[in-house]
Amino acid sequence: MQKLFVYGTLKRGYHNSFYLEGSKFIGEDFTINKYFMAVSGYIPFVFEDWMEHEFKGFIKGEVYLVDGFTLKKIDRLENHPYDYRRKKVKLKRFGEAWLYFYPHFSIKDYDGYLVQPNNGIIEF
């Protein structure tokens, strides 16, 4: 069993949450490090670095305890390691967990918007 930190469409009540059925919900948490989040259509993605630092914030999400089968299903959904890349991050309450990062961000090709932090917190 491994911890998975999710944001966006994998969270409870959103359309991809069924991928986590049978997994144990541990609770909500925040990343220790600050990242960026962008949204295109209704799809959010987190990325590690970009020059506009005023948009950097702690990502708020949900933590689950998942088995290897569930992790592989979500890897396929996120097209890991091509579209998104799964990487371990440190969380404020629950230690380390996997998080899916989007490694291809380019402001030149971007058609969505950056999520501004609210009191340092980014949530979608």
Image (cartoon, rainbow, N blue to C red):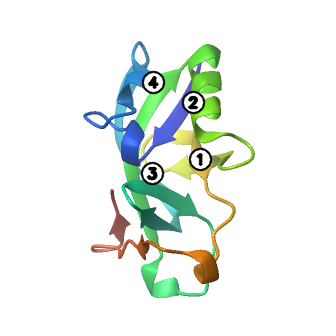
Name the residue carrying label 1: 100
- Residue 74 - label: 2
- Image height check: is 73 above or below 83? above
Extreme-right residue of the structure: 81
Q: Is residue 32 left or right of residue 15?
A: right
Name the residue carrying label 3: 92
Q: Amino acid at mark 1?
A: Tyr
- Residue 112 - label: none
Asked which secondary structure carries label 3, the reply is loop
How far apart, in angstroms, are the residues tagged by discs 1 and 4?
15 Å
Mark 2 in CB contact with mark 1 (< 8 angstroms): yes
How far apart, in angstroms, are the residues tagged by discs 4 and 3?
24 Å
- Image height check: is 64 above or below 117? above
Q: Is residue 12 left or right of residue 20?
A: left
How far apart, in angstroms, are the residues tagged by discs 4 and 2?
7 Å
How far apart, in angstroms, are the residues tagged by discs 2 and 1?
10 Å
Mark 1 in CB contact with mark 3 (< 8 angstroms): no
Q: Nearer the viewer, residue 123 or 103?
A: 103
How far apart, in angstroms, are the residues tagged by discs 3 and 2?
23 Å
Extreme-left residue of the structure: 13
Q: In which quadrant will I find the C terminus?
A: bottom left
